[in-house]
Amino acid sequence: MEKKQFQITHSIIGNSPEIEEIIDVIQQAAPTDITVLITGESGVGKEVIARAIHAASRRAKKSLVSVNCGAIPEGIIESELFGHEKGSFTSALETRKGYFEIADGGTIFLDEVGEMPLQTQVKLLRVLENGEYMRVGSSTVRHADVRVIAATNKNLQHEVKQKRFRPDLFFRLRSVSLWIPPLRDRRSDIPLLLEHFIKEITSKNSIRFEGFTDDATELLMEHAWPGNVRELRNVIESMLVLEGGRKLNADDVRRYLHIQQAEPVERHLPVVTSKTVEQAERELIYRALLDLKSDILELKESLRQGGGEAKGTNGDRIGDEPSNGAMSLEEMERQMIRRAIERHSGNRRMAAKELKISERTLYRKIKEYSLDV
């Protein structure tokens, strides 16, 4: 009962063995000031774990300051972390406290710590060892009583070998290491997460949700969730809000998960499953081309019967293909790419956006078809 209450209070939702083990470690480490390193893929909930540790610590009544190290430009990260004195650099119009000074007495959460520049890592190590730091532009040593929790989606051991992360800082940070497994490796947590997100989202948006059909729930359970818990929450929120709370079936879920269903047999095209992005993009282009070609053939036939001349939406005359419409998919794709680039006056980024493919794929196609555009 006590463990369940801990889960609910700190939003660690799940009953898988992996989550139970994480909770056990948190309950042991939280009351101390030991440094904790949280690792795992993006979206697994590393900040949720950090907040749980802070909330269960003796510093819970003080602030938890979250810092995304990867979002701060290298030139100002030391100023952001440790503060600066007025006039210490061009835009330093006044003295400013850094995050460590703001978090004094509480906890600082350094997210994406693997993105921190080497020079800044040296100064972080000093804070971890004796609580000392200096503001940028100052020679006065200051002290901060701060508990440090760090997180990263990188393999820091690999970063150390590549000399992108200091080994002494790595060993200092990992006093306690917590690895959060991806959602696909703890699918038994999905029902509880679904229940939690549905309750949270319906309450926030005043929605009465009628629920999922069994096949929709099965699809949610089977999905790989590459974006992990963050993706699951975002998808559920989109479905509930945009569908007005109506009962959702498997087809609804597929649409929001962007899962392609098998096309009718006569199309003779493969279904996009666990393939590379470029393969998927190629097949999606083929589907669009086939739909477009079908529309063009119908339009041409209609205009022939009416004595008109078929033209495309951009004024191009539609080519006189054989009466049976036989044209290779490669040639159709080639023409579609060429015309998209021409419509955007050679702007390949805009052409790729129109075609709904990546620029990298577009450049590869241009080279593959020797397009002079």
Image: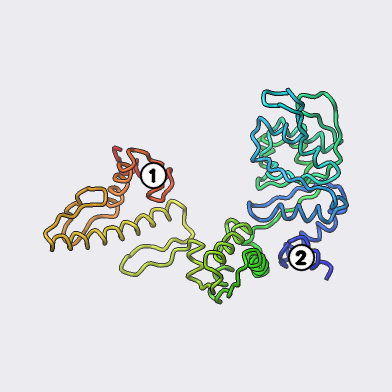
Side of 40 relative to 342 (left or right): right
In the rendered image, which quarter contains the N terminus? bottom right
* Residue 312 visible, this angle: yes
Q: Which type of secondary structure does the marked residue at label 1 adopt? A: helix
Q: Which residue is drawn at 59% across and 56% down?
A: 227
Q: For label 2, count other residues whose C-alpha is less than 10 Å away and answer few (under 14), some (14-19) or many (20+).
A: few
Side of 185 relative to 302 (left or right): right
Q: In this view, does 345 lie above or below 177?
A: above
Q: Which type of secondary structure does the marked residue at label 2 adopt? A: helix
Of label 1 and label 2, which has the lower sequence position?
2
Tell me which corner region of the image, top left, top right, bottom left or bottom right, holds residue 85: top right
Which residue in the protein does label 2 denote?
8
Q: Residue at x 39, y 43 (%)?
A: 350
Amino acid, disc 2: Ile
Point out which mark residue 362 bears: 1
State the image coordinates of residue 203 (x, y, percent, origin top left).
66, 67
Q: Residue at x 81, y 42 (%)?
A: 103
* Total residue callouts: 2
* Residue 189 visible, this angle: no
Tell me which corner region of the image, top left, top right, bottom left or bottom right, holds residue 111: top right
Mark 1 to mark 2 CA distance (whole Å):
48 Å
Q: Are marks 1 and 2 in contact (CB under 8 Å)?
A: no
Amino acid, disc 1: Leu
Side of 27 relative to 43 (left or right): right
Q: Nearer the viewer, residue 40 or 137?
A: 137
Q: Nearer the viewer, residue 313 or 336?
A: 313
Q: Nearer the viewer, residue 121 or 275?
A: 121
Q: For label 1, count other residues whose C-alpha is less than 10 Å away and answer few (under 14), some (14-19) or many (20+).
A: many
State the image coordinates of residue 281 (x, y, percent, origin top left).
41, 53
State the image coordinates of residue 32 (x, y, percent, origin top left).
88, 50
Q: Which residue is drawn at 85% across and 52% down?
A: 61
